[in-house]
Amino acid sequence: GAVVSQHPSWVICKSGTSVKIECRSLDFQATTMFWYRQFPKQSLMLMATSNEGSKATYEQGVEKDKFLINHASLTLSTLTVTSAHPEDSSFYICSARQNLGRGLGNEQFFGPGTRLTVL
Amino acid sequence: SQQGEEDPQALSIQEGENATMNCSYKTSINNLQWYRQNSGRGLVHLILIRSNEREKHSGRLRVTLDTSKKSSSLLITASRAADTASYFCATDASGGYQKVTFGTGTKLQVIP
């Protein structure tokens, strides 16, 4: 199946700093990428959907100024957590949709996740 | 927001027994997927069932889908200790803005 990578795998930062997480589709072009957040012992919550070349669409309750999403190319999306605080510590997972054309699966493939710890 | 709810929330069984997890969702879907996640790790894709399919098998996994009831079940037969993990259903909603949203998850413990 299609491969999605994330970088870094984990990051520890000080409160107030900004952290950038990259998501890449390695062997396919993804016009749409998704960012999820997972707190301990909870399910994945969709944060935002980004389409290449346009602004991201954020889910209700997600601050767009705090979680900056850039989808500059068909294989790369970045999530920047600005002015991170301890409550932003979480597991961030990206996903990329492979557009196979009308009537086909257009399935999403998930990255391995990035664990962010804010001290 | 969460599209699906799973039950049970947690399940503990003996090795060799079967484990059944259920997922209910709210809107029409293109497909439904089941994922597994070991503690603190990424997602492992298990199986995808499309909206026009009713049952699918993969090894010891059996998934059913009832679109009239908006529900799905995952059956793991002859469970092993290594099956201990959290299991999530994820639905790909049809129409409008396509995106995959996850259920609340079932934490499965298989006791050796």
Image: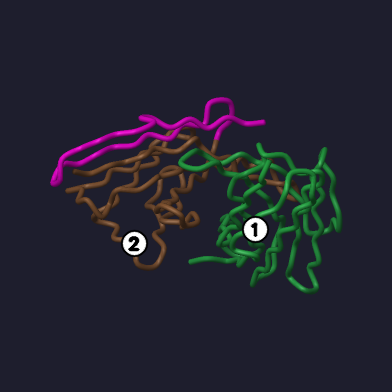
Q: CA distance from mark 2 to mark 1?
A: 32 Å
Looking at the rendered structure, the kind of residue marked 1 is: Leu
Question: Residue A89 location in percent, x, y?
Answer: 29, 48
Circle 1 residue? B11
Seen from the viewer's position, the closer of residues A56 and A119 is A119
Name chain B's colour.
Answer: green
Q: Report the side of A15 relative to B42 (left or right).
A: left
Specify whether A16 is left or right of B7.
Answer: left
Q: Residue tagged by mark 2?
A: A62
Secondary structure under tag 2 reads: loop
Frontmost of labels 2 and 1 is 1
* Residue B24 picture location, percent across and down: 68, 68
Residues shaded magenta: A1-29
Q: Chain of mark 1?
A: B
Quadrant (top left/top right/bottom left/bottom right) for the C terminus of chain A: top left
Question: Chain A takes which shade in the image?
Answer: brown
Which residue is farthest top? Answer: A27
Q: Position of residue B73 (x, y in %)?
A: 76, 60
Q: Residue at x 58, y 50 (%)?
A: B86
Q: Residues within 10 Å of mark 1 (few under 14, many from 20)?
A: some
**Which of the pair A14/B19 is nearer the observer?**
B19
Which kind of residue does numbered mark 2 sit on?
Val
